[in-house]
Amino acid sequence: MPQPPRKSLPYRILTAFVACGLLVGVPAAQAGESEEKFEKAFELGGIQKVRLQNINGPVHVVTWDRDYLRVSAVKKARGRRDAQILKDTEIRVLKQATTINIETVVPKQGRFLGIFSFGGDRFAEVSYDLLLPPKLAMEVETVNGRIVAEKRTGTLSLNTVNGSVRVEAHEGPLSVNTVNGSVDVAFAGPIRPTNLETVNGSVTVSGSRDSSIRYELQTVNGRIRSDFAGLTVEGKWGPREARGTFNGGRERLSVETVNGEVRILMAESTLRLPPRP
């Protein structure tokens, strides 16, 4: 199954700079907070993938045994213009061929490098909860907000800039990109094809003892640790790398971070993932 294209490290660092400067650096006026709820259900006949694009706010992807998609969201805004901000921030859901696109749409404003808009005080925070069948491919892109996904079996692609990413009981191909945040992944069984990248944060991956992996692990400021036998780490000072295979090397595992540890654990190990915040 094809994997989503990988964003380069320089691009993600630039994205973080722009996002921090334009989106999270504008304080809200001290006034009341307003919120508005959104909830709709969508049939999935002929649909192969769901894609969500957000700007500010967490995303939670949950699996259920029903054959339709439910989108629940809460828009929040603070300040003297909170009611107008909520009105101007739209949640748009469109079916395009075999994909359902969910998008947080904000007013058109000045743009920097064609990427992000000026005027961060006009953005609402939108938190999403998605319920969908386990096999449906899922892609999430956000800027400021953590991402959590549970019990997926289809291809999963999760991208954020400022936020942690947590994947629980996963059973399919996985791609994760973040800049400021940790990455915690627990497979329900063997480790599947996986690509994980962050800049500021540790990466933890756990899978069953019968995992068959071909691994490439890299960190600059941190250690590499593994419960799987035979892993050899190159470099004692500065960048550290580990490459090799375990149990036949059927599935590729690529992990890259700059500031943080890399931990590859067996699911039966006494060292577990930290509790969800």
Image (spheres, rainbow, N blue to C red):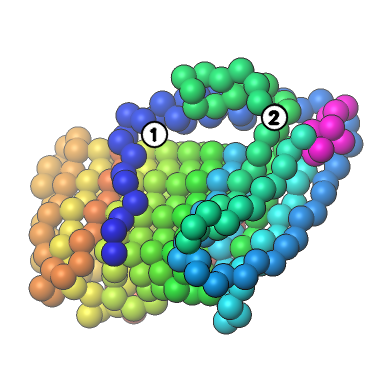
Residue 88: give x, y in percent of width and height. 77, 34
Task: Choose the circle earlier in sequence order: 1 or 2.
Answer: 1
Q: Pick whichever, 31 or 129, lies toward us.
A: 129
Q: Which SS type dominates the magenta stretch?
A: helix
Q: Amino acid at mark 2?
A: Pro
Q: Quadrant of the C terminus?
A: bottom right
Residue 81, placed above or below residue 232: above
Residue 119, placed above or below residue 263: above
Magenta segment? 78-87
Secondary structure found at label 1: helix
Residue that carries the numbered disc 1 in the rendered image:
12
Is 142 part of what is drawn in magenta? no
Q: Residues within 10 Å of mark 2 (few under 14, many from 20)?
A: few
Q: Amino acid at mark 1?
A: Arg
- Would you say residue 82 is visible in this rendering? no
Residue that carries the numbered disc 2 in the rendered image:
107
Q: Residues within 10 Å of mark 1 (few under 14, many from 20)?
A: many
Q: Which residue is pictured at 71% across the width and 55% down the height? A: 73
Residue 6: give x, y in percent of width and height. 31, 44
